[in-house]
Amino acid sequence: MTQAAASPLDPLAAARLKRDLLALGFDRVGFLAAGPVADHARYREWLARGYAGPMRYLERQAAARRDPRAVQPWARSLVLVSLNYHLPDPGSLAPREPGRGWVSRYAWGRDYHRVLGRKLRVAGDRLLSDWGARRSRVCVDVLPLLERSLAAAAGLGWIGKNTLLIDPQLGSYCFLGALLTDLVLPPDAPVADRCGSCAACLEACPTGALHPSRPGWLDARVCISTLTIEAKGAFAPATAALLGDHVFGCDICQEVCPWNREAPSAREPDLAARPELQRPLLVELLDLDRPAFLARFAGTALLRAGERRLARNAQAALANQARRSPPGAAAESPEGV
């Protein structure tokens, strides 16, 4: 099908386009007209409150996030996609294993930037070759876009009290990506917020990053995910104690969410869990030099933390485990596992 980029797709053609894109392996596809982002004022307030913590880079292009057309003036529409990464594992809610740390689910397989980016590039090429688009651009965490807000506006789900996008069928374990295009696509309707009176995520957060007094606001300064991945330098003892056994990321607010209880498993083979990434031996993370770190974690999201932060996090987790252990007990050695 060839169509001039300035001509809007009719609903039947838009439905066919969605089917074409879903056939590439996405779990959800939604369309949105390029324009001002409704949540931008809230985002600016989040920054003003200091909730971004060490992620100061988010302030640099805050104004550009107001409208995708500030990124690409030719954009007429956005294609928002999600890719399920849920795996049937209790995660950090499982019984603790002495000597082992926790890694967030999203990092158990191949780096999602590569997996989702590859699919989106194919989708962009398809828009150009089959649907009459003249321009398209892929975004997987690389452009100043409020992907979560855009995905909610495109009907992929609602933003929950844990600040994550919740799909009523898939739950919240979903990677999000976007295609900017000069095609004019009929926008999808948003999904109603269905969190209701549930406060499971707010009550389960061990650090107060999420709190019942401010549902929908994340204080990244004390978020385990931010601390283990983004924060630089040594931890103060009180901060290290917040981490528990986590060495990369945190899923607690998702693990307790009722919408994730029946979430289907990920279909994408590249997102299958690598056992050595799920619960790594902490002592093996303490002395990794750069070559060893790259050899072990190449192609995974753990590269983001780097060997020094990972070692720092492992030290904190070992100290936390030692404090929990009865007198005379010791964490398991690699040989004893």
Image (spheres, grey):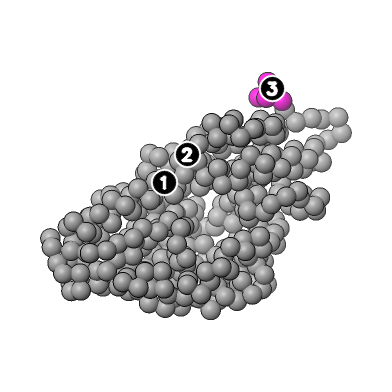
Sequence-wise, the earlier of marks 2 and 1 is: 1
Front-lying residue, 262 or 244: 244
Q: Are marks 1 and 3 in contact (CB under 8 Å)?
A: no
Q: Amino acid at mark 2?
A: Gly
Residue where numbered disc 1 is placed: 114
At which x and y percent is residue 100?
66, 35
Q: Residue at x 51, y 75 (%)?
A: 63
Q: Residue at x 29, y 66 (%)?
A: 181
Secondary structure mostly seen in magenta is helix
Where does the C terminus fall, quadrant-wise?
A: top right
Rounded to the nearest angstrom, the CA distance separating label 1 from label 3 is: 36 Å
Rounded to the nearest angstrom, the CA distance separating label 2 from label 3 is: 29 Å
Q: Are marks 2 and 1 in contact (CB under 8 Å)?
A: yes
In the picture, residue 334 is in which quadrant?
A: top right
Mark 2, residues whose alpha carbon is within 10 Å: few (<14), some, or many (≥20)?
some
- The magenta span reads 333-337
Q: Residue furthest right?
A: 327
Please say if 295 is above or below 17: above
Sequence-wise, the earlier of marks 2 and 3 is: 2
Residue where numbered disc 2 is placed: 299
Task: State the SS at label 3.
Answer: helix
Mark 3, residues whose alpha carbon is within 10 Å: few (<14), some, or many (≥20)?
few
Residue where numbered disc 3 is placed: 336
* 1 vs 3, front mark: 1
